[in-house]
């Protein structure tokens, strides 16, 4: 059993926004001990982490990995054109192109300190998504996007029975795979999903103990269309009427919501996923996250697909989340750093059903990061390490990533995969895809 003793690190406390110098003993998959000083067991590898900030790794609660190589080709389009273009590109992507897109997305996330993903993929991309996640060693919850109402001319249409058959297929392929993957149910969301499909998939999720992951209130026009179709105030009210909202429901974006709908979400225990970079880049709008937090709603954070966010850095997303709410409310005290750190870690971890992750705690699985605070001149201030990492740093400051007690990143380099080899193989694949996209 592999043992590591991390010495002289600064252990983060998100409740007090302070750090304390201490040591962490990892034995096998778990954190065995945390204390100011620990005697090194026999056969233990010692890591001197002086100047390093230790904290839980991040959970990205809304991702589309197959979009990771579409930064650039998808830039600066209005949402309707963007969506039609996306469907067209995904339809021409080969399995090899999809695999490398997913793998690069996984490795970028890991490089920036994320060890848990909540992925919404397509049926045709499922095998390559699973392959890439396994090769990256990340934890992931994976579901497939389904639709049965034509939102535009490119919307893929499935019957409810076919959506259920595919969800069963995901469950059989993914759930508990390698002890690091879970299945989810992940319909795209209203208005492209009928009430019947939403209800049948929620029933399937409940029967199998899965989370229900969907988009909510992302587009202003789409939200108005749902309200009109259901004769209600909006999408959240419609989902509540359909029986979809509960503590096992994740709601990506959650932008166009009334006060009444925020109250409905709070009462239901459902979990919004804030994706600020996407919301700004494709002009979806700005959700009222500060109001959600005031109501006790468990808000999480997601990087979404890189076709819309150009980003898989949770620190960048979290900083954007905080700044937007301060600007929206004209109150600099809202969405403080401690709250945002919890949104990135324990909030998302609990939402995805993990009980022994998300905190630096004895007995928990050893998923955590060490952040180098001494070699970036923007971060040099020993008394404000946590604040400065969030507001002045980024994922590239992550030096070391532990997952399941295994070091996957050390000194900013992957320990289990050859990054140069991956890039050498991926680059011509991406260029080939770019040539096909130019001919669309």
Image (cartoon, rainbow, N blue to C red):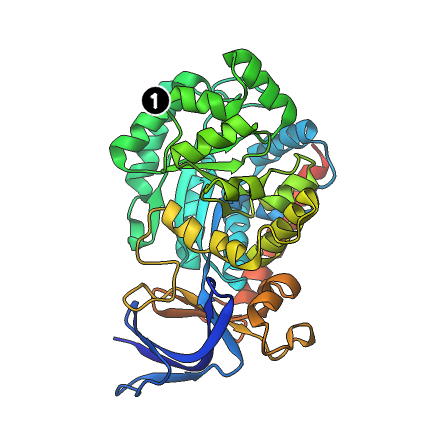
Q: Is residue 398 left or right of residue 143?
A: right
Q: Looking at the image, which residue is at 62% across and 68% down?
A: 388
Q: Looking at the image, which residue is at 40% across and 30% down?
A: 245
Q: Is residue 55 left or right of residue 150?
A: left
Q: Answer whether residue 400 is visible to the viewer in this image.
A: no
Q: As displayed, is residue 291 above or below residue 114?
A: above
Measured as percent of width and height from the top left, residue 26 is found at: 32, 74
Q: Is residue 96 left or right of residue 357?
A: right
Measured as percent of width and height from the top left, residue 406 is found at: 37, 69
In the rendered image, the residue lying farthest to the right is: 76
Measured as percent of width and height from the top left, residue 48 is found at: 45, 85
Q: Secondary structure at mark 1?
A: helix
Quickly name the residue at label 1: 200
Q: How many marks?
A: 1
- Front-most of 319 and 367? 319
- Front-most of 191 and 121? 191
Q: Looking at the image, which residue is at 62% across and 28% down?
A: 219
- Front-most of 70 and 386? 386
């Amino acid at each position: 059993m592999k043992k590591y003793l991390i010495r002289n690190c600064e252990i983060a406390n998100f409740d007090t926004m302070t750090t304390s110098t201490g040591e962490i003993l990892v034995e096998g998959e778990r954190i065995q001990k945390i204390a100011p000083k620990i005697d090194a067991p026999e056969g233990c590898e010692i890591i001197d982490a002086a100047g390093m900030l230790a904290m839980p790794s991040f959970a990205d609660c809304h991702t589309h990995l197959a979009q990771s190589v579409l930064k650039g080709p998808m830039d600066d389009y209005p949402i309707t054109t963007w969506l039609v273009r996306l469907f067209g590109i995904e339809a021409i992507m080969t399995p090899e192109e999809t695999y490398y897109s997913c793998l690069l997305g996984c490795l970028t996330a890991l490089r920036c300190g994320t060890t848990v993903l909540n992925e919404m993929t397509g049926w045709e991309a499922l095998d390559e998504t699973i392959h890439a996640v396994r090769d990256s060693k990340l934890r992931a919850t994976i579901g497939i996007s389904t639709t049965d109402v034509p939102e535009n001319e490119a919307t893929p249409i499935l019957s409810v029975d076919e959506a259920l058959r595919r969800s069963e297929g995901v469950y059989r392929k993914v759930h508990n795979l390698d002890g690091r993957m879970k299945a989810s149910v992940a319909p795209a969301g209203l208005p492209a999903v009928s009430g019947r499909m939403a209800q049948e998939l929620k029933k399937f999720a409940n029967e199998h103990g899965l989370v229900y992951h969907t988009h909510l209130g992302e587009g202003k026009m789409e939200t108005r269309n749902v309200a009109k179709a259901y004769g209600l105030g909006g999408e959240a009210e419609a989902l509540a009427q359909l029986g979809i909202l509960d503590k096992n429901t994740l709601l990506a974006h959650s932008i166009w919501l009334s006060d009444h709908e925020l109250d409905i979400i709070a009462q239901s225990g459902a979990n919004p996923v804030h994706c600020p970079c996407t919301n700004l880049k494709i002009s979806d709008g700005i959700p009222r996250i500060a109001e959600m937090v005031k109501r006790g709603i468990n808000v999480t954070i997601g990087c979404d697909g890189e076709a819309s966010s150009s980003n898989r850095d949770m620190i960048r997303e979290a900083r954007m989340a905080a700044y937007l709410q301060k600007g929206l409310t004209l109150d600099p005290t809202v969405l403080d750093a401690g709250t945002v750190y919890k949104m990135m870690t324990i909030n998302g971890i609990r939402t995805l059903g993990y009980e022994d992750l998300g905190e630096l705690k004895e007995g928990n699985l050893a998923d955590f990061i060490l952040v180098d605070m001494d070699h970036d001149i923007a971060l040099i201030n020993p008394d404000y390490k946590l604040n400065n990492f969030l507001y002045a740093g980024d994922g590239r400051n992550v030096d070391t990533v532990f997952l399941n007690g295994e070091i996957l990143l050390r000194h900013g380099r992957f320990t289990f995969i050859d990054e140069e080899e991956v890039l050498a193989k991926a680059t011509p694949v991406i260029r080939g895809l770019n040539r096909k996209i130019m001919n669309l």
